[in-house]
Amino acid sequence: MSFRVLIVDDSPVMRAFIRRIIVLSGMEGAEFLEASDGAEALDLLHAQWVDVVLTDINMPSMDGEELLRRLEADAVLKTVPVVVVSTDSTASRIRQMLSLGARGYVKKPFLPETLREELERVLGGAYAG
Amino acid sequence: MPDNEWHDMLAAATGEVLETMFFTDVSGPAPVGASSPEPRVAARLSFEGTPSGALTLSVSEPAVRALAANFLGSEEDDPLPAAQLGSVVCELANMICGSLLSHVRTEEHFKLSSPELMPSGTACPPGQPSQSLSLGEDMGDGVSGGTIDLWLTLEQHAG
């Protein structure tokens, strides 16, 4: 089963790493879209459907926190699951991002299987492995 | 928190990041003087919170190539461009700093700046690094070992 992932991170090498890890983790059928900040991500999300968004928090222009706020305010886009992938893993930050609508939180550094498990969890029936 | 506890946490954070994301282990403290002669790639970022501070790291150039190859999965006969190597070092600094700060017991968010690559020839902070670590013997990409130096500076808060 194919699924479309939008990776939002201002670091091109981190986007490449996440792509690689998803492929290496054995999840088949992933299609990738990329954005370097929240504003670019919103443009992409308004143009095409994605099954899951993986977003960093700390980005120029529009950060991950504002991206979550904008998605939550959009009746259609709020249904797209968002998983935060960030080096910031203080308990208060995780609580804040979950309260803003994030469905999951992966702390960098992460093991490939951690990302896979989180993706499978939020994709649910959309991904049958 | 005493400096030696910070330095131990820095070593642990570095090991965690290298093992998890770069598939490379830290073999232990680098021998004294092991870092100086090699060409190196350095990056720096600052953070605001309690405490505020900055982290600078410097990695020997052959080790950077091996780390980048491990991180991005490139082949030995397909060398990565210099800009990409710099980005990998910046990302390494970002993750080590984030991992370090995640172990600080606080309810406060830390705000990390974007890591910046230090121009070649730019001096690292004065004094001995907070940590100087030897990387694993078999890093892949034909590279054996290498060193990573880290300087952690913390702002002192009055009261």
Image (cartoon, helix red, strand yellow):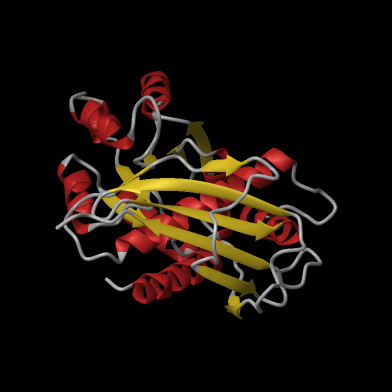
How far across and down, in percent of the image, does residue B56 sit? Answer: 51, 53
Can residue B56 be seen here? The reply is yes
Tell me which corner region of the image, top left, top right, bottom left or bottom right, holds residue B86. top right
For the C terminus of chain B, give its image quadrant: bottom left
For the N terminus of chain B, give its image quadrant: bottom left
Q: How many marks?
A: 0
How far across and down, in percent of the image, does residue A55 sit? Answer: 38, 41
Q: Is residue A112 left or right of residue B109?
A: right
**Residue toward you, B86 or A33:** B86
**Residue toward you, A13 or B109:** B109
Q: Residue at x 49, y 67 (%)?
A: B130
**Residue toward you, A129 or B6:** B6
Q: Residue at x 54, y 65 (%)?
A: B129
Can residue A22 be seen here? The reply is no
How far across and down, in percent of the image, does residue A119 sit? Answer: 38, 53
Question: Which residue lies most toward the right here?
Answer: B77
**Residue toward you, B129 or B43:** B129
Q: Residue at x 46, y 46 (%)?
A: B45
On screen, residue B43 above or below A76: below
How far across and down, in percent of the image, does residue A103 sit? Answer: 25, 47
Q: Is residue A102 left or right of residue A114?
A: left
Q: Is residue B42 left or right of residue A104?
A: right
On screen, residue B83 above or below A45: below
Q: Is residue B35 left or right of residue A69?
A: right
